[in-house]
Image (cartoon, helix red, strand yellow):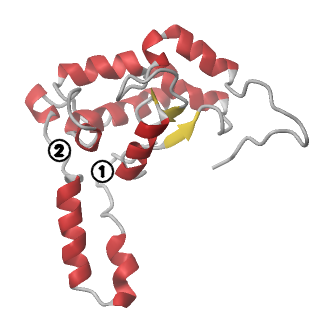
Amino acid sequence: MTQHHPPPGGKRADPTPAAFQALLARDPANELCFDCRRANPDWTSCAFGIFICENCAGKHRELGTHVTRVRSVRLDEWEPAQLTVFQKGGNTALDRFFREFEVAHMDISEKYQTKAADYWRVQLKAQVNLTDCPDPRPTKSEGREMADHYSSAKDRQAQLASRIQGLGNSNFEQAKKPPKPSGCCVAM
């Protein structure tokens, strides 16, 4: 991850790129954290095209990079092409989508691992890459289900404990690695 460092011996100007200020102004919902509605979010989920606060960014990181990728609006350097995901997505668009599938109320650890979230991530990536979405849109009831290649945090902990019990110390690090997602559902 590329970090933006202040110039030697100096203060840096407002580190929020002008392009982000335009995105925030374009959709007032982007000025609040998508997950907890805290004002002035300084973080993003690139996989979902949303703005989140520092606290929720930590919760997104716990999901793993196979689900979401978190970057700082102010600390990371951004290429113009990387901003396209926020032009195509945004807090209002994802909120509308999650409400349609009745997953908006779910906890962070669950809603981003549903089939609806999986579809959003894949179709958003397709929009950014100007390609067709390879996955069929789930039905409303399917959208609330956990995606096949994800499991709940409790299930993952139980799976990890079971895998560790069956291994010696030399294989401990291998046991901690999560299973790879199947199909095209790799986060951006």
**Amino acid at pointer 2:** Met
Q: Secondary structure at mark 2?
A: loop
Q: Disc 1 on helix, strand or loop?
A: loop
Residue in the picture at 38% in, 48% down: 186
- In front: mark 1 or mark 2? 2
Q: Which mark is residue 183?
A: 1
Q: Position of residue 46 (x, y in %)?
A: 48, 36
Specify few, some or many for label 2: CA neighbours under 10 Å numbering under 14, 14-19, or 20 or more: some
Q: Amino acid at mark 1?
A: Gly
Horizontally, residue 78 falls left or right of residue 173, namely right
Specify the quadrant of the image occupied by residue 157.
Answer: bottom left
Residue 93, label in figure: none
Q: Position of residue 44 (x, y in %)?
A: 50, 33
Q: Which residue is mark 2?
A: 146
Spot occupied by residue 24 in the image (x, y as percentages of width and height): 54, 15
In this rendering, is residue 1 above or below 78?
Answer: below
